[in-house]
Amino acid sequence: MDLFMTPLFTIGPLQIVVIVVVALIVFGPVGLGKKLGNLVKGTGQGVKEFKKALEEGKDDDENRRNFAISDMAEPGSTFKLVTAIAAVEQNKIKDGEIFETPESGEIVIHGLPLRDHDPLGNMTFQQVIMNSSNVATAEIAMRMDDDDFYQYARNMGFGTPTYIDIAGEESGRMAKPFEWSLVSLPWMSHGYELLATPIQVAQAYAAFANNGIMMRPYVIDHIEDTEGNVISQHEPVKIRRVAKEKTLKKLLPIFESVVSDSGTGEFAQVEGLRIAGKTGTAKKVVN
């Protein structure tokens, strides 16, 4: 089997365009990857080889889906970007505020325990994000109105399709506020009680990098006929502004600190480049 199940993205969020260049999963019988290469080259033989390979591997349809757009999971702490944007824009965090967390690293909210990966002590807001504190993030979220938090999440593209030009995209799952329980807001603040696809998370962070302008992701830049003439050209599609520029300028160094020697994303550092991001983990049900 030629099988690569991890979605890979190369996205260019600068200026006004976000392009998904690679969301490729090579699957199927042995040699299908090579046959796909021949197909891309545009040879007639390549088309025949690829069709034959697909027919031989028709029993593997379950593994043929595009995980980048069709698989959903709780985004975990990557969703803290939404909480951070909503809190800063609504002035829910005081300048210089210190967030106190218990020595045990655990609190109880409406009878349910919520814990950090390690006891983290007292933190500034930057340290809350840098160290990925669930406890402090939940405290921040509970200062907000349910409807307002939900709207920020929707503005960031969660719970709705990206409308990328690939068939089979899932829209994710995010309940409306009237369906929430007493613990929904604090748990959603760190990426639980909702489902997202990899492309939705990538689109949200691309909007962050694009000074708050969300673009529709796409794969096909243009289509040519057999003589090389362009018969269809994709034009960038601006969706909306997800946050104020001043909000994102304030948050950028905070999310850069995640990808530092002191942050949870230290291994994502690349010498000579400024990188901002957020780590995230989620639990998975195993039958």
Image (spheres, rainbow, N blue to C red):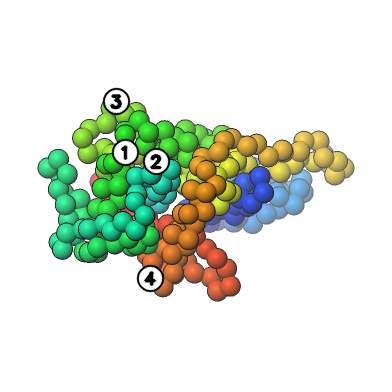
Residue on which disc 2 sits: 90
Q: How far apart are marks 3 and 1 (CA)?
A: 15 Å
| Residue contact at pointers 4 and 2, CB within 8 angstroms | no
Q: Mark 3: few, some, or many residues within 10 Å (few <14, many ≥20)?
A: few
Position of residue 226 in the picture relative to residue 88 (left or right): right
Sequence-wise, the earlier of marks 4 and 3 is 3
* Residue hosting label 3: 178
Q: Is mark 2 on a helix, strand or loop?
A: loop
For the point 55% across and 65% down, the residue is 274
Residue at 71%, 50% in the rendered image: 40
Of circles 2 and 1, which is in front? Answer: 2
Q: Residue furthest front?
A: 95
Q: Which amino acid does label 2 sit on?
A: Gln
Q: How crowded is mark 2: few (under 14 residues within 10 Å), some or many (20 or more)?
A: few
Return the residue at label 4: 262
Q: What residue type is labelled 3?
A: Phe
Determine whether the residue tagged by mark 1 lies in a helix, strand or loop: loop
User: How far is disc 3 from disc 2 in space, using C-alphas?
Assistant: 21 Å
